[in-house]
Amino acid sequence: MIDPLLKAAVAALPEFYQPIYGHSERWSASRKTEDRVEAILPIVEAFATLNGRPPRILDIGCAQGYLSLRLAETGALVLGIDHDPRNIRVCAMLAEHNPHLAVHFEEAEAIEFLAEMPDDRFDLVIGLSVMHHVCHRIGLAATRRLIAGIAARSPMALFELALREEPPYWAADLPADPYAFLEDFRFVREIRQFPTHLSAIARPLIFCSNPLALIGNALYRIDSIRSQSVVGIHDGEAAGQAYIESGPDMLKHVTFRSLNWDAKRAELAREAAYLAGPDRAKDDPVLFGHGETDREAWLRRSRLPGETLDIVKARGEPLDAIRITRCILRQLARLERRGWYHADVALWNVVLGPDGDARLIDFGALRREPVNCTWPEDLRLAFGQFLFDLTSSLPLRAFPVRRPRFRPTHLPFPFREALESLLEEVPVWSAQALLDRLDRFLQQGPAEAPPRADVCLATALDEHVDRLGDTVEALRSGYVRQRDGLDGYVRWQAAMEGAHHQTRQLAEMLDERLRSLERAHHETRRMVDPAAAGGQGSLPARLRRWIGW
């Protein structure tokens, strides 16, 4: 038999938004919650697996407490807050009826509670369809500051975000891009989208964290994270991309938000196919997992020890160019015997191990055709570019355009002789042929050769290309400055919108007070008018003259 006090409390609710925990068959809810519970439970379990204890969870806007109580079933310690005392009354009764669950409820305003939330009190902060109400109340800029506080004080957050395209009145106050709320998190991943009871527009449920990455259904600690595949080289906008080092693992995650979504997804699929296939070498990285949906793709593999050559060279450390080149050519020759060609042999795709040997990475660049991924398409010339980057004292300059410095005349012995021989004698790329020529010239030793006129021409052309590249980089820097200035203006505009929002709220409050005074004025007049007929000298008559009626 149902508790009559609970029955009365439920009857007094402003809305049956969530199911009533333990009584969902008796009261129907306007919106399902179990679908989102099922999406959140793996994250709660992943935290417990990683840390050896259940998480401490804050449920913002807990409504009737269904999510809080369901998460408490896992052993989590849950606090649900809601501003409506009628919701909290029902929640408290349900908690009393389930004393085995570590769940508590408080009547609190989300804005004030989050602003005063201490560090490290909660491991996971959940806000399901609540931030649009906060944004409507305090504006976009203030809401972003509130979420930034969550990012600084809690290791994980989950937000179900309403969208500007939705029909209710508050949608006009939302940003066009819901991810604008989440810029203070290093790792952001959309879990799923869920329908609502308000419209046909589904809302995204987004996982956010600074110290942790959610890959598949597992959490990993972030040692380092970047949004570009290459350290220090920016190949364009990087929203929706994450390259993470976590202990001995390398994690790659890309979402539909990336401008390179299709290419990046295909790249991860190729890397996974090679590392899981029969052609993988025993010292290649070990594939631990790969997954893909229509909105994201991820890969987890072991990380080779060492650093990429571009980083080592940038520090000015000496490099054994011959040893490195022979290591890379042996690996390329082995791949080619199995029908694979590496389409992006570059300093940033070669790891120099602690033993001095070099190892190719970026297995997503493997192709079945002998074509480079960028200009020059001819792999012979592309490898010449790699040799120049390796042996030259000039700094590596690869963005916005990679400088074409592949001329054999600029390479030192024995690379110049080996590459010239390859270009003259072998019509197509062959790593084994270049390795054989390199070894042959090493055995023969350098030969005296008179200066060649094309060396001067090649030098002049290289200088011209560098000047053109400098111009392009200067133009790009100017564009970036203008873009950053525009971003600053947009942030200022958002702040002004927040101030306008607060001013509008103040005006609405003053209008409401004025309406209240007018209603009081009207009621007072209604009481005074009947009494006024009794005589001009009566108290009501004097009161009417005093207030100016």
Image: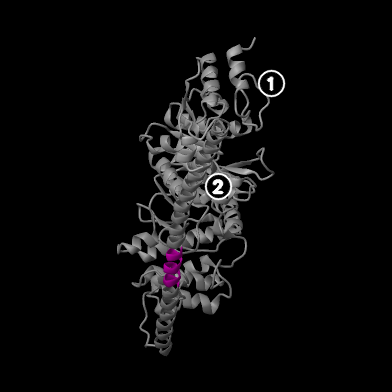
* Residue ID at (41%, 68%): 481
What secondary structure is the magenta-colored segment mainly?
A: helix
Asked whether 452 falls inside the magenta stretch, the response is no
* Range drawn in magenta: 476-486
Q: Which residue is mark 2?
A: 298
Q: Depth check: give the residue in front, 512 or 518.
A: 518
Disc 1 marks which amino acid? Glu
Q: Residue at position x 63%, y 45% from top?
A: 168
Q: Earlier in the sequence, mark 1 or mark 2?
A: 1
Asked if residue 301 shows in the view, the reply is no
* Viewer-closest of 75 and 466: 75
Where residue 77 sits: x, y (%)? 46, 24
Q: Amino acid at mark 2?
A: Trp
**Vertical position of residue 301 compared to residue 388: above or below:** above
Mark yes or no: residue 14 visible.
yes
Question: Is 297 rendered above or below residue 541?
Answer: below
